[in-house]
Amino acid sequence: MTPTNLAGIFLFLIVTTLLAYPLGEYMALVFTDQKTFLTPVLSPIEKLFYKICGIDEKKEMSWKTYALCLLLFSLVGIIGLFLIQILQGHLPFNPEKFKGVKWDLSFNTAVSFVTNTNWQNYAGETTMSYLTQMLGLTVQNFVSAAAGIAVLIAMIRGFIRKTSETIGNFWVDLTRSVLYILLPLSLILAFILASQGVVQTLAPYVKAHTLQGKTQTIAVGPAASQIAIKQLGTNGGGFFNANSAHPFENPTPFTTFLELLAEFIIPVALVFTYGAMVKERKQGWAMYWAMMVLCAAGILTALYFETQGNPILKKMGVAHGTNLEGKEVRIGVMPSVLWSVITTDTSTGAVDSMHDSMTPIPGLIQIFNMAIGEAIFGGVGSGLMMMIFYALITMFIAGLMIGRTPEFLGKKLGPYEMVMASIGLLSSPITLLIFSAIAISLPAGLSALTNHGTHGLSEILYAYASTANNNGSAFAGLNSNTLFYNLTLGFAMLLGRFTTLIPGLAVAGSLAKKRLTPGTAATLRSDTLLFVVMLIGVVIVVGALTFLPPLTLGPFLEQLMMHAGRTF
């Protein structure tokens, strides 16, 4: 770990913050129905869309109606994407004549993209037609991300409204998320990526003739448009199997920086949106610092251990310095480590290296980032919602310590809010641990491993941490395209998505009905250094208590055994 590496990391974090703040303020204007610089252009399109779809933008919903719309919209998306995959052999824009995708993989992929997970049990360039990639996957990249933003905005309204039965309109929030935020940013990024060499074409795959006289097929396609939204929407599903390690997805150092920035900027910006909407920007900064401290600690820890290299190879005299195995040489170690931590912090799941090839402690950091609910910025919308759950638990603990009813942003927190917050926080860990236990207990789960022992356990833990928390990245050492894993990972994604979003809406509905309570001298403020420290402590303690045993038997034990000369 060199001063240059540290400077590069902190420069990236500073640039992201400087760009995210105005974006966060802009999004607050969008969701509070105020005029922005894009309003004159986009407002007529928005109103036309409402008219065509029969949406009354002035009619608001209770939290139950909001949740029902979310569930029905997701169900239609799953069915539609499932059918597109099954029937793709009979549909147009299929120059390579790919056949329909088998039913269990179609189910897994449909659930994956609709839940904003983008876990991929397939190689994109050899499985999916152009139509499936564009009409199926890319569309879900937009709307699944927009759904996450919509639920967060509804939750924020629960704090700022008083004696209200409604928390907004799902269709309006969804439309504005796509039209005013995701679509403009994606258009800009797609054009820049295409200018740097990311492919964007509907032409058939290129047939090249090698010097040995053989024919090589070079996959191309409409990639730039999908790469833009896969990063901005914290989706992560690659057009090509190698994801952002592929030169057609990530060809230059500049695109590496842009794609990293894209996957980080909206989750960071939403923290500032939250502060602006509750009209206490210090609240946003408190959340920002809690998340950023955890993020920076993960990056520095992972980079330190990865740059120490593999002691076994050092003893053999065949390697020294950093661990280059599993990484694109043109990208290097520091960007690969930075990317691996950011992608597991933000629920993006895009990769530019093989996480399976990193040393054990960086793998532990990646699993921990996902296992705590990806509350360190997290996916667009869902990440901040998880951190708000942690904040509610923190306030509850503080209230018990001083004998007062816990409050947060002027709303008294009762048993109902605590139960919903606990469900939102614990549902994903429970899903992760139960499915992991089943997988390591059955031949169908163990037969897919390429490594056994502690590393094999890490591969299984990573898979269910990634899917239950809607990340989508993979350790890449698990052959998960089997009936067992397609089904269990699919159900993990469904549980991970909706057992967190629905409790968030329930909390919003409950809080919106309450009156605002003026603060007193005894009120624990949630915008102070003390609260930030307490919040960080709660996140770490909850994560450690929940996952210390499996992480100890997995990556931590592997780290010790690696130094003892044992591999798996």
Image: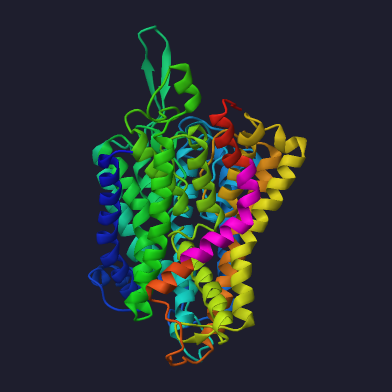
Magenta-drawn stretch contains 549: yes
Name the residue rendered at 46%, 91% in the picture: 516
Quarter the C terminus occupies: top right
Residue 72 appears in the rendering: no
Query: For the stretch drawn in magenta, what is the main secondary structure?
Result: helix
Which is nearer the eye, 420 or 42? Answer: 420
Measured as percent of width and height from the top left, residue 181 is found at 34, 63
Above or below: residue 285 compared with residue 198: below
Q: Where residue 113 sits: x, y (%)?
A: 53, 51
Is residue 252 shown to the viewer in this render?
A: yes
Residue at the spot 56% in from the left edge and 46% down from the top edge: 84
Left or right: residue 167 versus residue 447 is left
What is the span of residues highlighted in magenta in the rendered image? Answer: 536-553
Q: Hey, which quadrant is residue 559 in on the image?
A: top right
Q: Residue at x 39, y 6 (%)?
A: 212
Residue furthest to the right:
442
Classify residue 460 by image quadrant: top right
